[in-house]
Image (cartoon, rainbow, N blue to C red):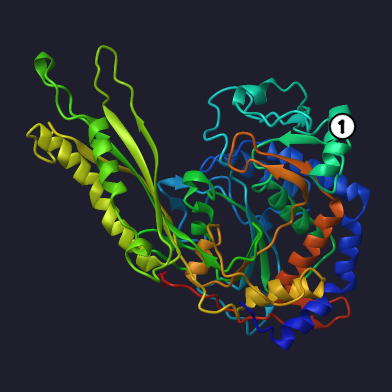
Amino acid sequence: MPATIPPPVAAAAEKIANDPQIAALLKDQSTDAAAKARWNQFLELVRIPSPSRQENLKAAEIHRRLVAEWGFSPSEVMTRADGVIEASDTNIVDGLPVYNACVVIKGSYSGRADAVNYKGQFPKVLVEGHIDVVNPEELPKTGDPSIRIKLQPYAQPVVATPEELAAIPDELSFDARGRVVENDKYATASKVFANAKDAEANGGVRIYVPGYGDMMPSTSNAFVLAAAMKKHNIKPVYDIWICGTAGEEGKGNLAGMKQLYGFDQKAGTGSNPLNFVANFGLEGGGTVNFLGSYRFEMKFKAPLPRGGGATGPSAPEAMAAAIARISDVKTPSELRDGAPRTTYTVGRASCEPPPAGRTVAPSCSLEVDMRSPRKETLDEIRNNIEPMFQAGASAENARYGRKDGSPEGITLELMWYGLRPAFVADNVDNVAVHAGLQSGIQLGVLTSPMVGAGSGSLNDNVPANTGIPTYQFTLASSAAGAGGHAFWEWGTRGAPATEVARMHRVLTAALIVSGFHAADGTVVPPAVGPLGKRTREVAR
């Protein structure tokens, strides 16, 4: 899909990309010392375990470094240890706090006499990457929670089990402060390669650690960029927030973005309480369409067996009956030509072990995931599948003559409900896409303003659904990698120069939207007005 780039955006991209202040920042980041600092920071952050909804340890370290090491004052850190953003109307998601880590690069706009705000919030541009990972699923209850970063020669096969991973003898070492120890193992891991073939031929290693590819390199480098902007006094017009967001993976339910955009799960709308005017994600791809999903975890609870050992309704049988009924459901795309592709998956099914002295499983849990790019078809498949949970329980109750809802029958409990809102772009002409594309054209990364028609499932589902223009980049550089979301996720270091080039593009795009005080004293005006969009108004 082609976009039409407005001439002011093209002019802004050229001026910003070639500004002496920006050039000084890039020169600074192009040194060997800066490349090493970025690499070390990534290794030190990625080893901190950060399961979805338990990101507090990683968020705390980012908060500490923002003030102690990266040059920010406490007032410029916009998130708190307890997970609260005071200006947001969504600080609890699924009953849990949200551990985002955000810092602001202050703009000049709020100081203008004619500045426009939304309920006290001046316009902002968001640059974000998530800090949570799939593995481990839970923080350890005791001991040192830090993840061991294992190193494996390419000549050896990729590990097949967690035990094989744990048995790898070579690993990176860290001191008592959490700083990487620069020994021989560090030297091996720090070698730079062009690709996997180069790494295999020249002594490269697989670096095993959750989050290597998804997505701590980009998120860590976002904070490098924030610190560099602060150091070089890069002055936007609108504020720019740079955030490490919580809850993108697993059952995170996009909690971090729901907080930032005031997304109400029951209403399915976002209030945008912080007044973001554009969103730049760091998950790559330039996606503009977002696959929505509904996820259910249902628990089938069995009654206690009657006296005398008599049997009764079974939780496993009820769950199996529900699965059988769900498997017969036809999706809209199966029923009608031209309907958006709609899918569902019967995922994890597990049963609670029987207590001592009993043979009956007290409960079983079933997860079902439904996906579609359109809310209408997503609602349709949900309406067809959701009754099947109760239908399975009812069928099992009927086998024993038990009434639904009675204490002697199978009962249902909703354990968790996940929502990723769907969004399909009617057109691709918005300020984030324009800035994203033109920054690439200006820097020679793109040759034409084209956007793919595919769909993604990302943090950006939330801002796009809320009405906020959004576009994705990456700040990572890996020679190779695999195993995203798996226990054996790994990568190999890529060229530092690629990271710097990607910083240049992200910085150019963000400043196109926010506006920029150039080195020559002129001001590049913001490419969008000061009031962000929203799908829900909230009274204050």
Please tell me which residue is depicted at 13% across the width and 40% down the height of the picture.
405
Q: Is residue 22 visible?
A: yes
Name the quadrant containing residue 452. Answer: bottom right
Q: Amino acid at mark 1?
A: Glu
Name the residue carrying label 1.
Answer: 182
Q: Is residue 108 visible?
A: no
Please tell me which residue is depicted at 64% across the width and 66% down the height of the picture.
286
Whole-percent x and y of residue 339? 39, 69
Name the quadrant containing residue 407. Answer: top left
Camera-side residue: 258 or 286? 286
Tell me the crowding category of disc 1: few under 14, some 14 to 19, or many 20 or more residues within 10 angstroms, Cα based.
Answer: some
Answer with left or right where residue 69 lies relative to residue 84.
right
Name the quadrant containing residue 109. Answer: bottom right
Whole-percent x and y of residue 293? 43, 56
Answer with left or right where residue 17 lies relative to residue 356.
right
Answer with left or right where residue 201 lies relative to residue 360.
right
Q: Residue furthest top?
A: 357
Camera-side residue: 307 or 2? 2
Please tell me which residue is depicted at 72% across the width and 23% down the height of the picture.
168
Please tell me which residue is depicted at 43% across the width and 63% down the height of the picture.
341
Note whether 239 is above or below 190 in the view shown.
below
Whole-percent x and y of residue 352? 33, 26
Q: Residue furthest bottom?
A: 7
Q: Quadrant of the C terminus?
A: bottom left
Note whether 526 is above or below 250 in the view shown.
below
Camera-side residue: 383 or 21? 383
User: Tag 1, which secondary structure?
Assistant: loop
Answer with left or right where residue 1 lies relative to residue 188.
left
